[in-house]
């Protein structure tokens, strides 16, 4: 699933193309893509004629402000991606949403597995949506050490599971939680409530560094090509991952074999030497 870096890269591409433009036409071609609205027609009606004021992001969600107070929320799901293209470009299979802007460019959403969505919310609906329940953004608004310690206090759940809880910080997923824990030399099975202030300091620093590096590298495109940049290119971050997806391969730091365990149903990769229990 695309995580914060991949969504942030997408946001930057979309912002360049969309901010200040007006939506001239919109069409949805799959009911699941518009499942948070009454119908695909409702999304189309709410978009057409509206100008785009900003393209933002919270965690893994795109948050696009329209000039009438409505907000477009987009999520890439497991396999979704947005593209910015011309109207005469071939329409790829599984293209479920197309918006045509007043300069002729098209914004398309391609999503083979249809776990992603495009929704248009008024202020009341947005306040009741999943976006309103998200924690602070892991890149832009990472909580200070004291706040994280307060959240973790008394928690017996493994720190890996807690990092995936979007109420703690929003945007981390399996890949970057594993990478941040490795960089911080923290075992993913450590109980969250057992972390010291120094360990949380290291973790905060590692989260920031891992996310920034991934963005610089264009995001992580895995072998399934589920994530591609809006221009159709693959991200380069896979080549620098320290632990994720490297089961049995030598640790880049100490040479020991990378191990894999399942934490709360999620594959988790770590170095048993560099991240002792």
Image (cartoon, rainbow, N blue to C red):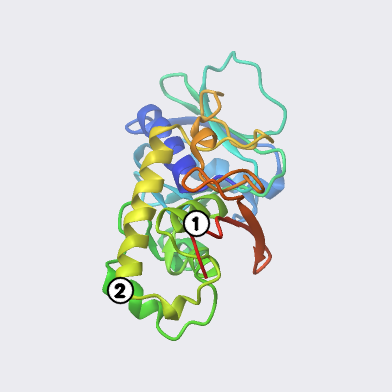
Please determine whether, in this image, residue 190 is positioned above or below residue 136: below
Residue 268 visible to the viewer? yes
Q: Residue furthest front?
A: 255
Q: Position of residue 81 (x, y in %)?
A: 57, 36
Using the image as rendered, state which of residue 273 and residue 104 is in the foreground. 273
Marks 2 and 1, how far apart in space?
19 Å
Q: Quadrant of residue 266?
A: bottom right
Badge number at residue 76: none
Using the image as rendered, state which of residue 116 and residue 51 is in the foreground. 116
Please determine whether, in this image, residue 32 is positioned above or below residue 169: above
Q: Residue furthest top?
A: 88
Q: Quadrant of residue 267?
A: bottom right
Badge number at residue 177: 1
Q: With 134 as the anchor, is 260 left or right in this view?
A: right
Q: Position of residue 79 (x, y in %)?
A: 65, 41
* First of labels 2, 1 by sequence position: 1
Identify which residue is drawn at 42% across, 41% down. Answer: 8
Q: Which residue is mark 2?
A: 197
Report helix, strand or loop for mark 2.
Answer: helix
Tally of numbered tags: 2
Q: Position of residue 142 (x, y in %)?
A: 32, 60
Identify which residue is drawn at 66% across, 47% down. Answer: 248
Identify which residue is drawn at 69% across, 37% down. Answer: 29
Q: Residues within 10 Å of mark 2 (few under 14, many from 20)?
A: few
Q: Position of residue 104 (x, y in %)?
A: 46, 19
Q: Residues within 10 Å of mark 1 (few under 14, many from 20)?
A: many
Residue 65 visible to the viewer? no
Q: With 172 as the anchor, is 19 left or right in this view?
A: left
Identify which residue is drawn at 28% across, 69% down. Answer: 145
């Amino acid at each position: 699933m695309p995580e914060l870096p991949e969504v942030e890269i997408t946001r930057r591409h979309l912002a360049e193309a969309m901010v200040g433009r007006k939506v001239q036409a919109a069409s949805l071609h799959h009911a699941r893509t518009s499942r948070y609205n009454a119908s695909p027609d409702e999304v189309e009606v709410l978009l057409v004629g509206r100008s785009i004021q900003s393209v933002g992001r919270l965690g893994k969600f795109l948050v696009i402000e329209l000039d009438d107070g409505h907000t477009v929320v987009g999520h890439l799901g497991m396999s979704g991606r947005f593209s910015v293209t011309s109207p005469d470009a071939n329409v790829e299979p599984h293209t479920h949403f197309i918006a045509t802007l007043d300069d002729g460019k098209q914004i398309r959403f391609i999503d083979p597995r249809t776990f992603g969505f495009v929704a248009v919310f008024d202020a009341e609906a947005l306040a009741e949506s999943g976006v309103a329940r998200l924690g602070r953004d892991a890149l832009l608004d990472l909580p200070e050490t004291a706040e994280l310690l307060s959240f973790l206090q008394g928690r017996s759940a493994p720190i890996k599971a807690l990092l995936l809880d979007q109420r703690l910080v929003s945007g981390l997923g399996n890949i970057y939680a594993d990478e941040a824990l490795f960089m911080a030399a923290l075992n993913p099975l450590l109980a969250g409530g057992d972390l010291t202030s120094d360990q949380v300091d290291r973790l905060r620093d590692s989260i920031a560094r891992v996310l920034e590096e991934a963005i610089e590298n264009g995001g992580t495109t895995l072998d399934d090509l589920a994530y591609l940049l809006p221009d159709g290119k693959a991200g380069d971050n896979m080549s620098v991952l320290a632990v994720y997806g490297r089961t049995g391969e030598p640790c880049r730091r100490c040479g020991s074999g990378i191990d894999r365990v399942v934490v709360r149903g999620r594959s988790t990769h770590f170095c048993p030497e560099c991240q002792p229990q």
